[in-house]
Amino acid sequence: MKSQNDLIFTIVAIIIAIGALAGTYFTKPEPQTFSPPEQVVVSDPQYPAGSVTYAPSLPGSGNQGGGGGGMTASTPPPPPSGGGNSAPGPEVPRAQGLRG
């Protein structure tokens, strides 16, 4: 009876080993193939035709220079938002700093 049990365990171990080797072989990762890189264009760039506006200041500054952002020199800046209440509020004390 002992040799029959040894024979069964040996056959089962061989079948499991063959299954593990077959699973390892058939599920091995394949190397990834990359497409060849595109040719790099090294000629001079072609810039689109457009109007360039040079201004001595940034758009929305105090003297309305630049005219960018939809504003022109004749358009006044929008009023600052005051939270919907135009009445002045109470005076708020300010921090004095370290000088006292």
Image: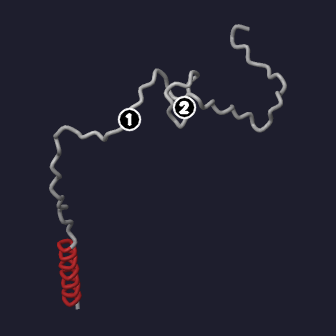
For label 2, the SS is loop
Q: Position of residue 61 (x, y in %)?
A: 56, 25
Residue at 82%, 22% in the rendered image: 91
Q: Quadrant of residue 14?
A: bottom left
Cβ–Cβ under 8 Å for marks 2 and 1:
no
Q: Residues within 10 Å of mark 2 (few under 14, many from 20)?
A: some
- Local crowd size for mark 1, using a 10 Å CA cut-off: few (<14), some (14–19), many (≥20): few
For this rendering, which residue is in front, 29 or 33? 33
Q: Which residue is mark 2?
A: 72
Q: Relative to the observer, which residue lies in front, 99 or 92?
A: 92
Position of residue 59 relative to residue 39, above or below, is above
Q: Earlier in the sequence, mark 2 or mark 1?
A: 1
Q: Amino acid at mark 1?
A: Ser
Amino acid type at mark 2: Thr
Quarter of the picture containing the C terminus is top right
User: Residue 43: where, in percent of width, then height?
Assistant: 16, 40
Percent across and percent down for residue 41 are 17, 44
Question: Which residue of the protein is positioned furthest toward the top in this rendering?
Answer: 99
Say which quadrant the N terminus sits in: bottom left
Q: Mark number for residue 51? A: 1
Residue at 58%, 22% in the rendered image: 62
Q: Residue 45 at x, y = what percent?
A: 23, 39
The type of colouring in the image is secondary structure
Image position of 62 (left or right of 39): right
- Pick the front one: 90 or 5: 90
- Secondary structure type for disc 1: loop
- Residue 68 or residue 98, whichever sits in front: 68
Q: Quadrant of residue 54?
A: top left
Q: CA distance from mark 2 to mark 1?
A: 16 Å
Q: How many marks?
A: 2
**Residue 79, labelled with which disc?**
none
Residue that appears at 35% across and 38% down: 50
